[in-house]
Image: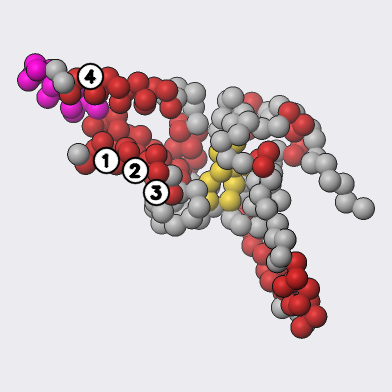
Amino acid sequence: MTSLLPPVGTEVFRRFTPASLEKDHQKREAEEEDRLRDVSQKVTHLLNLKDPPKPANHLEAGKTLPFIYGDPPPELLGTPLEDLDPFYQSQKTFIALSKNQIIHRFNAESACYLFSPFNRLRTAAIKLLLHPYPSPLFFILMILINCVFMVTEVPVLKNAEEYVFVVIYTFEVVLKLLSRGICLGRFTFFRDPWNWLDVLNITA
């Protein structure tokens, strides 16, 4: 009988590698063959769709890693790891953990159609994106400061701050595009409405 409890200990954290991606691909192919084997299996499959599998609530993106998994090794923080949620293990995704052990989920498809999950530029962008500094609080503070400067009446200062904030917002958008991809996939840049605000700040 399969245990319903998740595996514990640091051995559950495995780097996301090309072999992991191939294993996910083979798992999807095996599942597809099982569904198409014969008519009786198709009927069983249709009956099972009444209660389809769902993502694990405790492993959702943005939540803290449950304590049952233990503390991941420090060298694995901010790096691509195999997804811990069985629901996503065959959906070409991987996770990365920030230093405060918040779960971040990414698509394993090439970001911007160029950068695979194993590309050094993309892994560096992910590590920088998950670094505690700059935090989301930093960017919220920048938006508030930008609003204050927008109402100032000093022309020289106003022009200077516009360039500074455009550079900051552009850097954040480029970092997210490199690490998450554009829009093809559930966890990409434009699937998060909060990212639309960054684009509006740059283009406005």
Say which residue label 2 marks. Answer: 196
Marks 3 and 1 in Cβ contact (< 8 Å): no
Say which residue label 1 marks. Answer: 200
Is 160 magenta? The answer is yes
Query: Which residue is rendered at x = 29% and y = 36% of the image?
Result: 170
Q: Position of residue 127 (x, y in %)?
A: 50, 33
**First in sequence: mark 3 or mark 2?**
3
CA gap between label 1 and label 4 equals: 18 Å
Marks 3 and 2 in Cβ contact (< 8 Å): yes
CA gap between label 2 and label 4 equals: 21 Å
Q: Position of residue 7 (x, y in %)?
A: 80, 40
Amino acid type of the residue that numbered disc 4 sits on in the rendered structure: Val
Amino acid type of the residue that numbered disc 3 sits on in the rendered structure: Phe
Q: Position of residue 86 (x, y in %)?
A: 71, 51
CA gap between label 4 and label 3 equals: 28 Å
Q: Answer above or below: position of 97 versus 190.
A: above
Mark 4 crowdedness (10 Å alpha carbons): few <14, some 14-19, many ≥20: few
In the rendered structure, which segment of residues is drawn in magenta? 153-165
Q: Is residue 79 visible?
A: no
Q: Answer above or below: position of 159 versus 15.
A: above
Amino acid type of the residue that numbered disc 1 sits on in the rendered structure: Leu
CA gap between label 3 and label 2 equals: 7 Å
Say which residue label 4 marks. Answer: 148
Considering every residue shown, the one lying at the far bottom of the view is 39
Say which residue label 3 marks. Answer: 190
Local SS, label 1: helix
Query: Which residue is rendered at x = 24% and y = 23% of the image?
Result: 146
